[in-house]
Image (cartoon, rainbow, N blue to C red):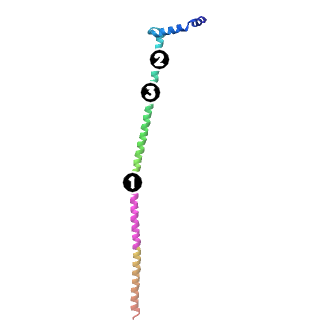
Amino acid sequence: MGNSSNTAQKVAPSQVDNENKETKKLKPCCACPETKRQYMRKMLWNRKRLEHYMGSEERTTESLNSLVSKMNEQLQRSEDTTSTLIHSSAVLHETHNQFNAVGATIRVSGKMISKYARRETTDKFLISLALLLYFGVILCVLKKRIFLF
């Protein structure tokens, strides 16, 4: 072990740079183990990225489906609320019409009661007048029969 570290120290940095330049210039062949490892790493990394992308796509799809179902539920609630509001408005309109009809009946009844009150007053006056006339006639008859003047 000591020898390998010594040899690494003995290699000049310029030699390492030259070797790196040469390996970069050369095309890697598919048969060498180094190229296979790099190729496999890239493939695994691409596969993981693809799985992550597909997983996020599935999560996005699930999220969108959830959002669509929530929107459908909200739409159904809105439709129910609208139908309830329409029904309530119809009932309110019908109640208003009945209220107006009852109000008209009460007004007519009030007018009739005031007419009957006037007729009662007129009837009392006429009855009083008739009684006066009756008693006047009785007095006249008594006066002629009892007092002969």
* x then y, percent, for residue 17: 52, 9
- Dot 3 corresponds to which residue? 58
Mark 3 / mark 1, whichever is N-terminal = 3
What's the mark number on residue 44? 2
Q: Nearer the viewer, residue 137 or 105?
A: 105
Residue at x-position 41% and y-position 43%: 80
Which quadrant is the C terminus positioned in? bottom left
> What's the amino acid at mark 2?
Leu
What's the mark number on residue 132? none
Q: Nearer the viewer, mark 3 or mark 2?
A: 2
- Dot 1 corresponds to which residue? 94
> What's the amino acid at mark 1?
Glu
Within 10 Å of the Cα at label 1, are there few (<14), some (14-19), or many (20+) other Cα atoms?
few
Which residues, given as a range, are shown in magenta?
Answer: 97-119
Disc 2 is placed on an element classified as helix
Residue at x-position 40% and y-position 81%: 129
Q: Nearer the viewer, residue 14 or 50?
A: 14
Q: Label 3 vs label 2: CA separation? A: 21 Å
* x then y, percent, for residue 127: 40, 78
Q: Quadrant of residue 112?
A: bottom left
Mark 3 / mark 2, whichever is N-terminal = 2
Which quadrant is the N terminus positioned in? top right
Q: Quadrant of residue 4?
A: top right
Residue at x-position 58% and y-position 6%: 10
